[in-house]
Image: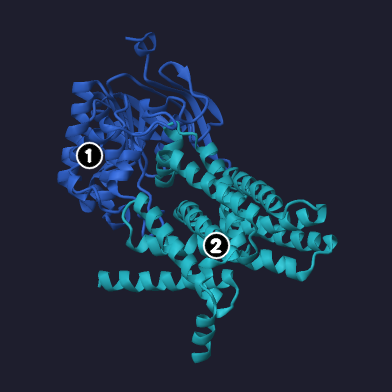
Chain colours: A cyan, B blue
């Protein structure tokens, strides 16, 4: 413990470092975008969609490495295609929602590993995408991530009232003339964008943590859709900031630490909600 | 008055529907005229909900046509906010489900506003009126998953009322609602129909409860057994027994259930 404190004291504060500033920025963007989309996924019983899209994004990364393209754009392309494919299978009734996700998740990881080997990618490169690599965010990446995060939040804000009607009852929304198919596709695409943002922070294998854990925490205390979104974003950004800071001082992987702080936040909120209820 | 207003609001012509080869509806033709309060009655499994979903375009019949306001229905939601729907209560929510009663009822106003147009003061006023009409003002901020089944049902009715549609389609809306609230809701529907000319179609398996309230009855049991003014149909024991089987049995089991 003493050694740790000594080490912490001898380090300059993380906020003073460029790469940590970019890490905090990317973390905050993902911290807001992930639970916003995650709320709609959880309420529609599609929590695992985040996982499936993360795996699809991994195939995109590997494909981009093979072609020498930008891995973030590769991930985005694969995740968007995956999201539309899953939505198509689900809405056509050809596979239950969870099975559609499982198909794309396993296909994404399998194809990703094959492509990565063909690309001759080292294990270290892949490790960064699988488990996050916040501290390697470059200035250009930070701007791209911020733009994608802004797109997600703006998309949800613009169609908030339609998404409310959809989440309440899809069948009645359809019968009353709302463009349900387009809303579902739009939500799936925004989920894909979110997964790519979150991939940078926690990695494709841990994306679901950022999209689901803060939402399940918010659901225990929030009344109303607006407050659920707000609380989930608050829990998530707090967890990201705490996790990133702890990771810096403890010298552990940032993505993994963030998942641990997300889970801790969830446990705290659950305990508080349980006490209030009893 | 538009030309289309002269004909029936809804006409179903020769509807056939089966689930995986099992016939559910056969040659059903039904007309809903403007200003009618039609009770669609039949025992459980008689195809009432299926027929309602076909009318809304949520299910596609294997044969037959659906016309609303004189025009063929080609896709669900084609007539937008002119038709409001109260589905059978489903308990398929994740728990806890954070949507509040007020948000649910507000969702009923969404189809009236275009994409990217915010809901306004008139929408919020309509929500308040609808909540008052079903006696749920004091539960407006409660989460749906914190309500009893009957309260949830009233909230869903309020959503349809808030839509302020010309036509109301209701699928077993009284399920789980206590007698006093049922009474109030029937009065409200009758008032809507008599005073504002709204057209109402209500699915029910409860003949006794609905007979004194509706203007017309249609009896369904895979086929349409009969339809007409309530006095004609309710006074025709043969038609009723062909719909429900042994009527005394129905009356008896109803007495036990209530």
Percent position of residue A102, x then y: 63, 59
Q: In the picture provided, is A245 more to the left or to the right than B209?
A: right
Percent position of residue B234, x then y: 24, 30
Q: Residue at x 26, y 53 (%)?
A: B142
The quarter of the image holding the C terminus of chain A is bottom left
The answer for how far apart the CA atoms under marks 1 and 2 are is 71 Å
Q: Residue at x 66, y 59 (%)?
A: A55
Task: Please tell me whether mark 1 or mark 2 is closer to you in this view.
Answer: 2
What number is the disc on residue B89? none
Q: Is residue A260 above or below residue A88?
A: below
Q: Secondary structure at mark 2?
A: helix
Which residue occupies the foreground of this view, A86 or B22? A86
Chain of the residue under label 2: A
* Residue bearing mark 1: B208
Crowding at mark 1 (Cα within 10 Å: few <14, some 14-19, many 20+): some
Count of number-bearing discs: 2
Q: Residue at x 63, y 47 (%)?
A: A89
Percent position of residue A29, x then y: 52, 55
Which residue occupies the foreground of this view, B172 or B129? B129
Chain of the residue under label 1: B
Q: Quadrant of residue A176?
A: top left
Crowding at mark 2 (Cα within 10 Å: few <14, some 14-19, many 20+): some
Q: Residue at x 49, y 24 (%)?
A: B73
Q: In the picture provided, is B19 more to the left or to the right than B86?
A: right
Q: Secondary structure at mark 1?
A: helix
* Residues tagged by mark 1 and mark 2 found on one chain of the structure: no
Q: Are the residues at dot 1 and dot 2 in contact (C-beta closer than 8 Å)?
A: no
Which residue occupies the foreground of this view, B92 or B50? B92
Percent position of residue B69, x then y: 40, 18
* Residue bearing mark 2: A21
Q: In the picture provided, is A189 more to the left or to the right than A43?
A: right
Residue farthest toward the bottom in the current orientation of the protein? A2
């Amino acid at each position: 413990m003493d050694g740790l404190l000594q080490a912490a004291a001898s380090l300059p504060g993380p906020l003073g470092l460029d790469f940590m500033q970019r890490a905090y920025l990317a973390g905050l963007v993902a911290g807001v975008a992930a639970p916003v989309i995650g709320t709609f996924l959880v309420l529609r019983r599609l929590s695992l969609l985040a996982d499936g899209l993360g795996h699809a994004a991994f195939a995109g990364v590997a494909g981009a490495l093979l072609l020498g393209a930008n891995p973030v754009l590769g991930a985005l392309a694969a995740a968007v295609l995956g999201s539309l494919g899953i939505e198509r299978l689900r809405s056509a009734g050809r596979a239950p929602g969870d099975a559609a996700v499982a198909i794309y998740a396993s296909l994404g990881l399998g194809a990703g590993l094959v492509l990565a080997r063909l690309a001759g990618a080292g294990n270290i490169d892949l490790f960064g995408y699988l488990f996050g690599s916040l501290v390697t965010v470059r200035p250009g990446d930070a701007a791209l991530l911020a733009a994608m995060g802004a797109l997600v939040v703006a998309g949800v804000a613009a169609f908030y009232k339609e998404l409310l009607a959809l989440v309440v009852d899809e069948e009645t929304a359809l019968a009353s003339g709302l463009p349900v198919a387009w809303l579902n596709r739009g939500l799936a695409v925004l989920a894909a964008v979110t997964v790519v943002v979150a991939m940078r922070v926690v990695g494709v294998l841990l994306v679901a943590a950022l999209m689901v854990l803060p939402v399940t925490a918010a659901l225990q205390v929030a009344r109303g859709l607006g407050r659920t979104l707000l609380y989930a974003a608050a829990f998530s950004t707090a967890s990201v900031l705490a996790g990133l800071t702890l990771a810096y001082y403890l010298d552990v992987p940032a993505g993994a630490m963030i998942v641990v702080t997300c889970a801790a936040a969830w446990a705290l909120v659950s305990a508080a909600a349980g006490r209030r209820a009893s | 008055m538009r030309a289309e207003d002269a004909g029936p609001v809804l006409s179903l012509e020769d509807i056939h529907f089966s689930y995986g080869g099992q016939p559910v509806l056969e040659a059903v033709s039904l007309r809903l005229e403007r200003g009618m309060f039609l009770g669609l009655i039949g025992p459980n499994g008689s195809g009432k909900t299926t027929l309602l979903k076909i009318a809304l375009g949520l299910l596609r019949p294997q044969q037959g046509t659906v016309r609303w306001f004189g025009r063929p229905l080609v896709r669900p939601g084609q007539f937008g906010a002119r038709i409001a729907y109260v589905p059978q209560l489903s308990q398929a929510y994740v728990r806890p489900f954070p949507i509040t009663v007020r948000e649910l009822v507000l969702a009923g106003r969404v189809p009236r506003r275009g994409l990217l147009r915010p809901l306004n003061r008139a929408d919020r006023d309509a929500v308040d009126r609808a909540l008052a009409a079903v006696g749920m003002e004091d539960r407006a901020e409660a989460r749906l998953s914190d309500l009893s089944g009957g309260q949830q049902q009233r909230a869903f009715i309020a959503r349809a009322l808030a839509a302020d549609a010309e036509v109301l389609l209701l699928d077993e809306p009284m399920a789980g609602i206590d007698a006093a609230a049922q009474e109030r809701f029937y009065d409200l529907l009758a008032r809507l129909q008599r005073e504002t000319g709204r057209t109402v179609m209500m699915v029910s398996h409860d003949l006794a409860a609905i007979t004194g309230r509706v203007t017309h009855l249609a009896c369904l049991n895979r086929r349409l057994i009969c339809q007409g003014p309530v006095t004609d149909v309710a006074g025709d024991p043969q038609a009723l027994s062909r719909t429900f089987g042994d009527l005394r049995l129905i009356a008896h089991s109803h007495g036990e259930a209530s």
